[in-house]
Amino acid sequence: MGSCHPKTKGEPPDLLLAAAFVSDAQYNRNIPFKTSPEAVRLYYLYNHWIMRTATYFFIFLNLSLAVFEEPAVYPLPFLVTSVVEVLCLVVFFGRLTHFAKVTRRNVFWKDTKNICIMVAILLSLTDLAIYGVLRMYDVRSIRWSRIVRPIFLINFAESRQIRRAFRSIRNTLPEITYVFLLFMFSLLMFSLMALKLFGERNLQTAEGLPYFKNYLEIVFDLYVLVTTANSPDVMMPAFDFSSWYALFFIAFVIVNTYIFMSLFLAVVYNNYKKHLKNEIRKLAYMKHCKMIEAFNILKEEEGAQFVVREAQWKQLVKLVAPDISNSHRELLLRISDDEQKGFIDKKSFVQLADLLNIQVITLKIRSHPLGQWMPGVYKSAVSRFLRSMVRHRGFVWTYDVIILINAIFIALDEETPYISYAEWVFLALYIIEILLKVYTYEPRAFFGKNQFWNWFDTLIIFAALTATILNTTLRSTTKYNSQQILDIVFILRVLRLIRIVDSIQRFRVIMNTLINIVPTMLTFGGLTLVVYCVFAIIGMELFHGKIQFFPANSNAPHSLECGNTALKDSLFARAKYCKNNFNNFASSFIVLMELTVVNQWHDILSLFSLTPAVFFANGFANVTVQPAKLYFIAFHIVMVIIIVNIFVSFILEAFFVEYSLEKSEVETAIEQKIQELGMGVQEDELQDEHLLDNMESAEHDLEGEGGTKPQSKGLVFKIASKRYRTVDSLLQRMFEAEIPLEDEGPSVEEFLNLSPTAAIPSNVTSESAA
């Protein structure tokens, strides 16, 4: 049910129900579904990967409509966008109806996220109808319902990680508020001191404007100084007047930038981690409960205890994890039934979900195809010498030196003939390297499923070869000179230098760690997407059309002022920031990204603080400046102070866990059993003897000659202890040392004694809306 849909036809209803509970425990799904045979089959369909992929597709299609709606990056007729939106809403309603069919009625209507989805669908349809009618009468209106579109990304059952992150942020806000109030008190106090120190000295800024005369402007300027975006510009008038005044700004930066911003990071992370740990504790509790439910469905009496028979256990595992190999399944059985009694007791059965989440690699020992087709040639003395040379560290070091020399030639002028010819020499050397590796290592192992670096290396080399040949052919046969092809060639040449990362062990460890925590980074990517979408839509409604971008050679009126006379002779216009506007969804995203980086964000803010004066009456110009600033300050607080701090902290925590696992592999029950069976393979054997890198792969075929000693069945196993099937597995790994088992609800003994009716507590319901 996780990655593919199991074949449920003809399976006993009890087995299907038990498999549903085990699958939910494995993937940490917390959906209280009905247990009738029909509802269980609908539940399998609900969790089918095609259904989940289709849901995500329509969610992102719905969000992407902002690119094609007015104000549009690529305009489409209103009829087209409205039909697509209605189609998306119909799909969402169908998905929600499907969810209602598999859950109990009282649970469904008490679940806040379901109510949120229904309200969002209703609001979207209502707004679409009103907007369409007003459009027929040429009345311009605002598509206010676009701001609710991210609700679908947050509140569908598939987005539990994003929902969990929002809940943790919501629970963290009270503690953040206290620190923020203390920070604002410090900011207001320093602003008052600045007003008294500099307000009466008639100082001026570089633009000739009064310096620190208005208290609210001082508060804003010092708030920007906290981000260092206007440093040292904001200090210079006072510093020019007297060098002693620099002490005021130094004290301000130390207190507010270094102390308070660090305090923000500490408080945000500490509280977020505390609430996230509580979430993981609940997940662990629910996982155990679901496994007890599955056991109670399949249990049979064996003497004085209840057990699950080996035959049923195998059928169950085949339903839950149909993709794992038979040898992997037998290995899990040997772990669960250590004494080979023909049954699995309750304690061993409860561990099944955790065992399935540990990625085990099955490696088949086979000889190289050339050793079968041409044994005389492949096993000759020359061939053995060649293969031993390729396996030697010196071969890797030689190509590291070649890569560095290639980097020097890339930086030189390509118009020099010798430099141009050298490119062909380097390409030939790289192709020879790949061919020698394929000759030495078993091809199916070298190009294994997850052999990232080998695939990357090969694709880059052959793509560069193709682009170079195409570019050379076009230049020699015609006068055509494609800059696009040249750009591709240059990029591919530079990308080849990344190969050196694979050659240095510590680099490889760091890169593999980053790759392994990508799923957790995607969770925060979804969180960021939600915030960006909301602020981009609000920004387009507030600031659309206030700033215009014109090409450099444009003769349009006010083109030098970005189409707005209020920006005449402004720093913003002189710096050619005109493309930083909210005229469409893509431009809004770029502006928000610039605001996230915070460099020069005050200039962008000042720009949009001026433009409302054009929109409103002149008498309200001073009033309308403040709401514009509040929009940008609100984005800075939400995105930079809260979400970015949480993102950085979480990635650091995940990196520490992954990095420590790279240095000391965790001994698990699976590893111990593998070693007991004499079917283990060590990490260094994979790296030094057979594979050039330590990226794990599934169902590899390894060369038997000169490496790992072949086993009786031709199989060896290895734990991919640094890889997790789910984000929840990584989270649990992060907090397992801090969450004792007795804190995860009942103890193991209490779990083992739970009755079928007590397995799922009555007070535990499905996840609520964020």
Image: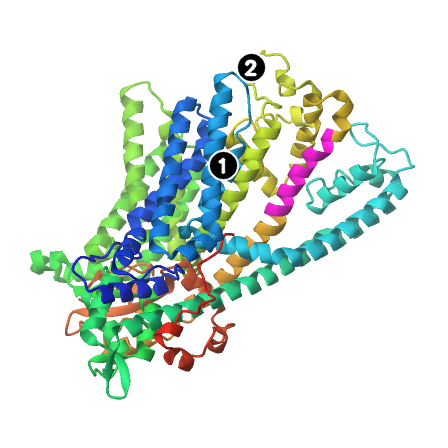
Label 1: few (<14), some (14–19) or many (≥20) C-alpha neighbours in 10 Å: some
Labels 1, 2: front one: 1
**In this view, 488 is above or below 256:** above
Question: What label does residue 123 carry, if any?
Answer: 1
Residue in view at x 73 percent, y 44 percent: 223
Q: Can you name the residue that lies furthest to the front here?
A: 106
Instruction: Considering the whole magenta stretch, tell me its main secondary structure.
Output: helix
Residue 637 painted magenta: yes
Residue in view at x 56 percent, y 63 percent: 275
Percent across and percent down for residue 695 are 33, 59
Q: Amino acid at mark 1?
A: Leu
Percent across and percent down for residue 322 are 23, 60
Percent across and percent down for residue 472 are 30, 28
Percent across and percent down for residue 736 are 47, 71
Q: Earlier in the sequence, mark 1 or mark 2?
A: 1
User: Which one is in front, 27 or 218?
Assistant: 27
| Colouring chosen for the image of the structure | rainbow
Residue 708 in sight from this viewpoint: no
Q: Quadrant of the N terminus?
A: bottom left
**In this view, 441 is above or below 227:** below
For the record, the magenta segment spans 624-639
**Residue at numbered disc 2:** 553
The answer to whether 456 appears left or right of 517 in the picture is left
User: Which one is in front, 529 or 573?
Assistant: 529
Quarter holding residue 615: top right
